[in-house]
Amino acid sequence: MATHKIGIIMNGVTGRMGTNQHLIRSIVAIRSEGGVKLANGDVLYPDPILVGRNEAKLQALADAHGIERIGTDLEAALADDHNVIYFDSQTTVRRAEGIKQAIAAGKHIYCEKPTATSVEGSLELARLAQEAGVKNGVVQDKLFLPGLLKLKRLIDSGYFGEILSVKLDFGYWVFEGDWQEGQRPSWNYREEDGGGIIVDMFAHWRYVIDNLFGEIKSLTCLGATHINSRVDENGETYKATADDAAYAIFELQNGAVIQANSSWVTRVDRDDLLTIQVDGKLGSAVAGLRDCKTQHRVQTPRPTWNPDIPNPFDFQEQWEQVPENETYDNGFKIQWELFLKHIHQDDAFPWDLLEGAKGTQLSDLGLEAWHGRKWVDVPELNL
Ligand SMILES: NC(=O)c1ccc[n+]([C@@H]2O[C@H](COP(=O)([O-])OP(=O)(O)OC[C@H]3O[C@@H](n4cnc5c(N)ncnc54)[C@H](O)[C@@H]3O)[C@@H](O)[C@H]2O)c1
């Protein structure tokens, strides 16, 4: 039984995703469980170095979570052979530069989505990684949400029969920052800083649709900047130049139609911040982040349209919960564990930089459809 320490450069770890999901819920959680246990009894133990601009912030984060190594010099961290993985959760516009440096230094790459700000930029990263022979992976956390795992279980069981349509509703109200602090970083609302809900969320919708529902044939999208002035982290008013809502339709190769609403300017009256309703010939289901409920054809009531009487149905009661049947861990952590095993013993890890580039392709096409007021086809993407 050996313990294999894996040196990981974590860049952008002082940010919202870096701190909460990648450091605390993934790397720190794995370390506190004693590492990732392999079938032969060996253990993979992540040994991160937190890298960034602000030494005091990095030190405070390291002290709070028992991390031994920090640094403000990325080149020095890349030059150290102990570090075999470069992880990047910086703001999107900074990602490509960091990844290119890391590939040149021979590091394996793991990073947040979107991998770059254009499909060309994302494909370039995938190509460079392939040419350098480094392993690579991109966060696709939504695939590991309990609600989506239950939905996938239904799809794989044949529950739906033919899937006819899907309604994907994502969003919540992000405060404008004037009378209540915004709960997302202000760069999200500035196009020039890599912001915008299409760039952000289509990266997710691509792998969710590809993995659950099938290949996308074409799409149309209407973006909007509903709120055009917000207040930033320093109390300064700024012009919101990026889209804060997107209304899209995806047509799949298999004929299914997906309507996808993504919005930071909507108040929630749904079961969850993300709900995915799937209507199949044999049954329907609605998945949220953790839960998934079903209504089979034999349990489908017969509503009749009659506004002259009070509604006799409690529609919410007509659905049945899909049982847990397993315990669900944090999705970011699961993917980290799989990536560490991929690095150490070559276990399969299909969510690579090419898959990440497909996400950027979809957001580029969404923007093209919106600005051109048209339907666009989604061509196959290859290296
Ligand atoms: N997988 C998901 O569900 C999910 C959710 C939200 C965001 N994200 C992605 O994660 C990334 C980070 O988002 P966030 O919300 O954590 O942002 P954030 O603004 O909270 O964090 C950004 C990080 O980048 C660093 N950074 C910014 N400018 C820098 C500079 N000039 N030099 C060096 N470092 C710099 C910051 O210090 C911070 O550590 C984005 O690419 C975003 O698209 C993914």
Image (cartoon, grey):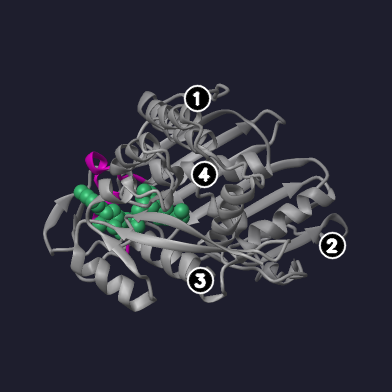
Q: Which residue is mark 4?
A: 137
Question: Of the numbered discs in the image, which one, if any, rests on residue 225?
Answer: none
Ligand 1 contact, mark 3 (Cβ < 8 Å): no
Packing grade of label 2 (10 A; few <14, some 14-19, many >=20) is: few
Ligand 1 contact, mark 2 (Cβ < 8 Å): no
Of the pair 68 and 116, the residue shown nearer to us: 68
Please tell me whether mark 3 or mark 2 is closer to you in this view: 3
**Which comes sooner in the sequence, label 3 or label 2?**
3
> CA–CA distance between discs 3 and 2?
47 Å
- Element under disc 3: helix
Please say if 55 is above or below 258.
below
Question: Of the numbered discs in the image, which one, if any, rests on residue 299?
Answer: 2
Q: Which residues are magenta?
A: 183-196
Please tell me whether mark 2 or mark 4 is closer to you in this view: 4
- Residue 186 lies left or right of residue 380; in this view the side is left
Please tell me whether mark 4 or mark 3 is closer to you in this view: 3
